[in-house]
Amino acid sequence: MSQPRLRVLSLGAGLQSSAIVLLAAGGEIAPFDVAVFADTGWEPHSVYRQLDRLTGIAAAAGMQVVHEVVLRPRTRRTPGDAPGCGPFTCPHPTEPVDPDPPEPADVGTAAAGREVA
């Protein structure tokens, strides 16, 4: 089997892709040539902080991270929109998207026996 000519990581800055960056930077897996963060422009601040951290780690290990804004919608569906109504095809009224939404508190934590949304 031939070796890949270009190793590209789709970087979302979440748990899985962050782990891949750390494993590659630590030499546990083969390094990638480039990681691409396709940014909607509406990520929580915590995602951008993690992206900055991962970019530095990847750069120190000789791997490039490309941060590209690919979509920045201006409106989103409201809770009363009809089923199947898409964010860009909905004929119903829309509301402006908050460009700086508050970060959720205690993400991923819950008391024993309770589900985490």
Image (cartoon, rainbow, N blue to C red):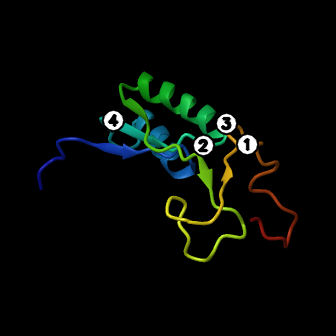
For label 4, the crowd category at 10 Å Cα-Cα, with few meaning under 14, some 14 to 19 and many 20 or more, is: some
Q: How far apart are marks 2 and 1 (CA)?
A: 9 Å
For label 2, the crowd category at 10 Å Cα-Cα, with few meaning under 14, some 14 to 19 and many 20 or more, is: some
Choose top left, top right, bottom left or bottom right for residue 23. Answer: top left
Residue 82, x across and y down, in percent? 63, 75
Residue 44, x across and y down, in percent? 66, 42
Left or right: where 77 falls relative to 38: right
Choose top left, top right, bottom left or bottom right for residue 81. Answer: bottom right
Amino acid marked by disc 1: Pro
Q: What residue sits 77% from the left and 42% below the top?
A: 102
Task: Give me the disc on residue 29.
Answer: none
Do the residues bearing badges 2 and 1 touch, measured as CB atoms within 8 Å? yes
Q: Distance between the residues labelled 2 and 4?
A: 23 Å
Do the residues bearing badges 3 and 1 touch, measured as CB atoms within 8 Å? no
Amino acid marked by disc 4: Val
Residue under numbered circle 3: 45
Q: Closer to the N terminus: mark 1 or mark 4?
A: 4
For label 3, the crowd category at 10 Å Cα-Cα, with few meaning under 14, some 14 to 19 and many 20 or more, is: few
For label 1, the crowd category at 10 Å Cα-Cα, with few meaning under 14, some 14 to 19 and many 20 or more, is: few
Q: Closer to the N terminus: mark 4 or mark 3?
A: 4
Residue under numbered circle 1: 101
Camera-side residue: 30 or 107?
107
Task: Give me the disc on residue 34.
Answer: 4
Element at badge 3? Answer: helix
Left or right: where 30 falls relative to 105: left
Q: Distance between the residues labelled 3 and 2?
A: 9 Å
Q: Which residue lies furthest to the bottom in this view?
A: 83
Amino acid marked by disc 3: His
Residue under numbered circle 2: 42
Name the quadrant of the N terminus.
bottom left
